[in-house]
Amino acid sequence: MKPDFLEFIPVKLVSCIEDFYRQIYASIIDNKAFKKNLVNVRSLKELKFDFEIIKSLEDDEVSLGEYISYLFPCNNLKGILSNISDLLGVDFAKEIKALFKSKQDYDDFFVTIEEIFTIRHRLCHEASVVTSLKKKDVTKMIDYSYHFLHSSGLIVLGFLYPNSPMTTSEMKASSEKSYNEAEKELTDLIKRIKEGLSKTDFPETFNYIEKWKEYRKERARENAGNFAEGGSMYPILYLMDLEKITRQKIKELRTDYKWLLR
């Protein structure tokens, strides 16, 4: 990707974060045990209710949570954490902090996510020039956003459905199953490509794949370690990252050998 285009990735990431959290807001509000906490949400204190929406609510065309979720501001991390804290009646920032091995790592995460919102605001609302981002900066933003959303979802689900049968071991088993499926897909794809190339003047051994798998492990260890090193979530995040990196390689190979695979 051209360096000039990297600065637009934060715009996409903010859209993902906003959409994800609006779904989270709706899920909490539509849960009977937490709906009562709406009166405690500070960001909605000045809300003027649109009575035209009442009929749609009564006809079940839209749920209360779906409607109100779009009234929450989602323009910075601090506000999002505050909204979830008010809705759940807990310190959600503290729940997120517990996933990190040190305060320094959490602070790094917080600054990175806030930077995503800042860059998006400058581009979309101020039309100002953003200093060109480097690929490593954007990669870090993507990794942190990915783990932030997934971890947030798991934490919220734990509050909404405390008696859910989805234990840590079950989540690990599910993540491992998804990774193994991706690994098999990659192995089958490479086999198919090698067979196709063997009939051309440019056969490929794919000997580099073993080295790439070592890189994959190190990358997954680092990403999971930034969030939950030593914690019960670590093996789950590690497996999730293995799957994500594997699927990225699958996509890359399908693009590179599109001419052969069609």
Image (spheres, helix red, strand yellow):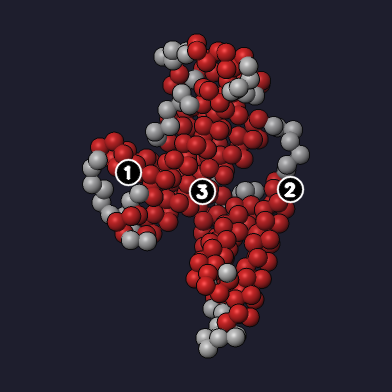
Mark 3 nearby-residue class (10 Å; few <14, some 14–19, many ≥20):
some
x and y, in percent, of residue 181 in the image: 68, 61
Q: Taking the image as drawn, is residue 34 in sight?
A: no
The residue that appears at 33% across and 55% down in the rendered structure is 5
Residue assigned mark 2: 170
- At mark 2, the secondary structure is helix
Q: Are marks 3 and 2 in contact (CB under 8 Å)?
A: no
Question: Considering only order in the chain, which callout, 3 or 1, is on the residue closer to the N terminus?
Answer: 1
Q: Taking the image as drawn, is residue 140 in sight?
A: yes
- At mark 1, the secondary structure is helix
x and y, in percent, of residue 135 in the image: 37, 59
Residue assigned mark 1: 119
Question: Considering only order in the chain, which callout, 2 or 3, is on the residue closer to the N terminus?
Answer: 3
The residue that appears at 34% across and 42% down in the rendered structure is 120
| Residue 244 found in image quarter | bottom right
Mark 1 nearby-residue class (10 Å; few <14, some 14–19, many ≥20):
many
Residue assigned mark 3: 146
Q: Is residue 147 above or below residue 258?
A: above
Question: Considering only order in the chain, which callout, 1 or 2, is on the residue closer to the N terminus?
Answer: 1
Picture quarter with the C terminus: bottom right
The residue that appears at 53% across and 48% down in the rendered structure is 147
Which residue is nearer to you in this view: 33 or 128? 128
